[in-house]
Amino acid sequence: MPKAFFIGIKGVGMTALALAMQDAGWEVSGSDVQDSFITDSILSSRNLGVRPLGQTLPTNLDLIVYSGAYSPPNSDIRTLTLAEAFAELVADKLVIAIGGVGGKTTTSAMLSVLMRTAGRDVGYYIGTGSVIGLDSPGAYGTDPYYVVEADEYAISKIDLRPKFALLTPKILITTNIIHDHPDIYENEDATLATFTELIRKLTPGSTWICNPSDPLTATILNLQGQALKAIKVIQYGSDHPLFTKLNLSVFGDHNRLDALAAVLAAIEAGLAREEALTAISNYKGAERRQERIGEGSGRLLYDDYGHHPEEIRLTLQAFKEAFPDRRLVLVFESHTYSRTEALLTEFASALSLADLVFVMPIFESAREKGIEHSVTHSELAGLVEKLGTPSTPLDWKTAASTIASESKEGDLILTMGAGF
């Protein structure tokens, strides 16, 4: 049995890959920080030993996989980034890749649950701690098809290509194409170029499932018309005939669109239409995606991973529509200074859709440590306030008591951000 060691194994992507490789016959262990993380439970239950970072590597290793958050180790053992190791794992699979800024985790989870419910033992790789209806966020599977959450972020600190550049999908879903990760993509044009290159890589006979109401998607459809003739293009939106036939447990039109994309991909992968529509109803949700945490003191508590203005806007709209009689209290932690600074106005506009906003200190990524920052959470809160929504900057020491005192019975409290 080959042996692999993961440096930074607790990250959701690293955990998903480790579990999939374990399924494929690898003996897997790894190292990471000792802080608690959402993947701790699944790593423990699958007996994937996690040692502190910096300890001596195990003996007789065949492969080292390292997270993009770390530098490669100084070792003679074959060493790959997460993206490289994953591309090798699925080299013989028919990849269904789900990309986009917002919706890719949910769509990947929906499609994986759908296919497995229908009796198809697909492999899957999903960037979250857990999905209701799946044993783990990563599996290898015996089916020819493999569902992949395709990440547009950089492969590593020294390889700034997107992770999905190493994939050649048989079926590609793009939920949307929006400028994000300003530390990697300077502007919207750079984002557009990256996704255009991914679509151009599709081989004859492949399928691209896309929503033409997204402006950059429409741009690609218009500019790449000749290049797209060799592939099948399936367009979807709220006017699609299957949109109203979806029976879902999750709320919000953005979730219905994600479910529709998953159903269309399943049909392309061989499921009958009615079979796919029936199976999608078994999707009950994923961790930190409009996740209901509980209720206490008359307050309903939800948690969500949204950290881009467009994700935030769609999610808040969904909550307002689903709970029209509740005041929506948002507790938001912006993720990375670079994103906050580049999209500050857009963040303020999106956050203002809530009825009351508390803004936590900005999450500082490892790449940003030691750098002087020109934007603060107080500035963001002030911009939200100027748009007419009460907004208060908080610190972590007093946040709980302040939120408890300023919220009231009947409120829906939503914590939101990638760093919570």
Image (tube, helix red, strand yellow):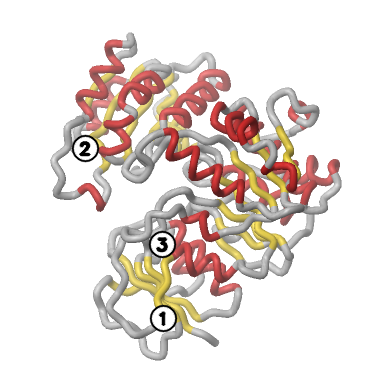
Residue 49 drawn above or below residue 262: below
Asked whether the viewer can see residue 67, the reply is yes
Q: Position of residue 284 (x, y in %)?
A: 63, 42
Residue 362 drawn above or below residue 117: above
Q: Position of residue 225 (x, y in %)?
A: 68, 36
Disc 3 element: helix
Q: What residue would you read off at disc 1? A: 78
Towards the viewer: 353 or 268: 268
Q: Position of residue 100 (x, y in %)?
A: 53, 41
Three-letter amino acid code at disc 2? Answer: Trp
Quadrant of residue 244 within the rendered picture: top right
Mark carried by residue 40: 3
Left or right position of 118 against 2: right
- Label 1, label 2: how far apart the Cα atoms are: 42 Å
Disc 1 element: loop
Three-letter amino acid code at disc 3? Answer: Asp
Towards the viewer: 164 or 347: 164
Mark carried by residue 396: 2
Towards the viewer: 128 or 96: 96
Asked whether the viewer can see residue 252, the reply is no
N-term-proximal mark, 1 vs 3 = 3
N-term-proximal mark, 2 vs 3 = 3
N-term-proximal mark, 1 vs 2 = 1
Q: Position of residue 280 (x, y in %)?
A: 73, 43
Three-letter amino acid code at disc 1? Answer: Arg
Image point 34% across, 71% down: which residue?
31
